[in-house]
Amino acid sequence: MKIKVKKRASTQFRKGYPLIQKEDLVDTQVETTEWIDLVDQQNQFVAKGYLGKQNKGIGWVLSRDNEVFDTTFFEKKFVVAKAKRTTYFSDDLTNAFRLFNGEGDGMGGLIIDYYDQFAVFSWYNQTLYLHREKLVEAFKKAYPEILGAYEKIRFDTQGLPESQFIYGKEAPEPLIVKENGVQFATYLNEGLMTGIFLDQKEVRGALVDGLALGKSVLNMFSYTGAFSVAAAMGGAVETTSVDLAKRSLKKTQEQFEVNGLDLEQQKIIVMDVFEYFKYASRKQLTYDVIVLDPPSFARNKKKVFRVAKNYGELVKDSLEILADEGVLIASTNAANVTIQQFQKMIEEEFIAKGVSYQQIGLYRLPNDFQTTNAFPEGDYLKVFVYKINQM
Ligand code: SAH
C-alpha cells in the first residue's frame, strides 16, 4: 500500500527521522495494518514502514530502502542489534539488559529486554502486534539460545492480558538476575513491570563502585529499592527508601534479602515523598546521598506532579536535609524536558538557596538502550550528580 506524505515530512524521513505523525499524511484519515510505502507528492519512494497508533505518533519508518519485510529482514534487525550488545553478553557481573530498543535499533514500536536467558517483548501498538508471529520467528532465529519469552502489551489491550508467556520454558518466580554483581529479584509475568528499570544500570553501578561507601542514602520514589540495594552493596551504612505504593515495602525487602543484606540498616517507608521531606526536616534527619528519580507524571490525592513543572520543589526540599558535602543524584526520564531545561531547573534551586555546587557526574542512556541521532526524543534519560557545599 502506498501512502502519500507531505513535502516537509518526506524530507525528514529521507534524513532518517523515524516517527510518522498524523499531519505528515496527505490523507490524514488513512488507516491500515499492512506494511506501507511512503511516497512523496510526485509518487517517488521515500521509505517503508507501518501505521500504528501509540501515545506518540501514528507509525514508524523501518527502512529507507525498498526492501521486502520478510522474516530475514527482521532477523537482520535483531542480529545487528545483538552485535551491539556483545560487551553486555560477555560481562560476568551483568545478565539483564536491553536487546532491542525500538527506533534506536531501527524498529519503533517494539522493545525486547534480556533477563538471564529469558526475553521480554514489549509491544507499543496494535499493528506491530498483528505481525508478531513473523517478528518472534525472526527473533528466535537471531537468538536460538533464549530459553523462553514473555510479552507486555503497552497499547489499549482490548481484552488482551497486559502480560503473558509466549514460548519456550517458563522463568522461575522470582528470576534472580545480576547487574554489576548485585542481584535483583524480577518477575517476568507480573503486569507491565518486572521489578527493575534497566536504563539506570550505570547510575546503580556508580553507587556500587564507591559513591555510596560509608554514606547514609535516601532514595526517593524508590519503587523496588534498586538504588538502595546498589548503595548498600556499595558499602552504604544505611539506606532509606521512600515510595507511596504499598507493594514497594515487600518488593524492596526482597531485593535486600536476595543479596544477603541485613534489613536492620535499611528503612523502607511507604509514604508520599513530599510528606517524608517534611517529616525528615522536622526530625532534623540528614543524608549524605539523596537520589531523586520520580516518574515524569504522577497524581495523588493532594497534587499532580510533573517533572517539567515541579522538579525544582524536590531539589529545594532535598537541600533542607542533605548533609554538608552531600551528593544529590537528580534523575528524570521525562522526554519532554531537555537536558538544558533539566539542569537549569536543578541549579536554579542551588542558586536560590545560596549553596555552592559542583557537578561530579552526568549519565545518559547506557549503550544497550540504543538511540538514533535522527530521533533525539528517544534519548530521554538525564541523571546529574552534584556535590553540594551548604556553607
Ligand atoms: N527510582 C525507581 C523507579 C521509580 S518508578 C527505580 O530506580 O527503580 C516511580 C515510583 O514513584 C513508583 O514506584 C511510584 O509508586 C512512586 N511515586 C509516585 N508518586 C509518588 C509520591 N508522591 N511519593 C512517593 N512515591 C511516589
Image: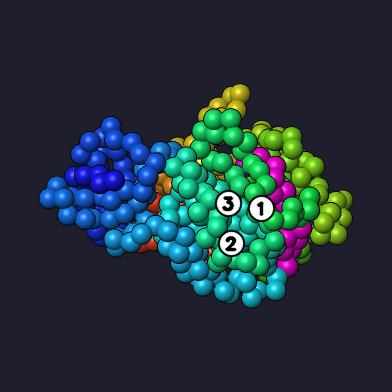
Disc 1, SS: strand
Question: Front-most of 371 and 77?
Answer: 77
Amino acid type at mark 2 = Lys
Image position, residue 305 (x, y; %): 53, 34
Asked if disc 1 and disc 3 are in contact, CB closer than 8 Å, the reply is: no
Q: Nearer the viewer, mark 1 or mark 3?
A: 1
Question: Front-most of 203 and 76?
Answer: 76
Asked if disc 3 and disc 2 are in contact, CB closer than 8 Å, the reply is: no
Image position, residue 216 (x, y; %): 73, 55
Left or right? Give the position of 7 relative to 172.
left
Q: How many marks?
A: 3
Q: Which residue is mark 1?
A: 167
Callout 3 crowding tier (Cα within 10 Å): few <14, some 14–19, many ≥20: many
Disc 2, SS: helix
Left or right? Give the position of 193 relative to 80.
right
Vertical relation: 375 (above or below) 306: below
Q: Which residue is mark 3?
A: 121
Query: Does the rendering let one see residue 363?
Result: no
Q: Which residue is mark 2?
A: 140
Q: Nearer the viewer, mark 3 or mark 2?
A: 2
Q: How does the figure colour the protein chain or chains?
A: rainbow
Residue at the location (24% across, 41% down)? 25
Of marks 2 and 1, which one's residue comes earlier in the chain?
Answer: 2
Res 209 label: none
Asked if disc 2 and disc 1 are in contact, CB closer than 8 Å, the reply is: yes
Of marks 3 and 2, which one's residue comes earlier in the chain?
Answer: 3
Left or right? Give the position of 7 relative to 73.
left
Image position, residue 286 (x, y; %): 70, 49
Q: Which residues are magenta?
A: 176-192
Would you say residue 378 sits in the magenta stretch?
A: no
Looking at the rendering, which quadrant does residue 211 occupy? bottom right
Q: Is mark 1 within 8 Å of ligand 1?
A: no
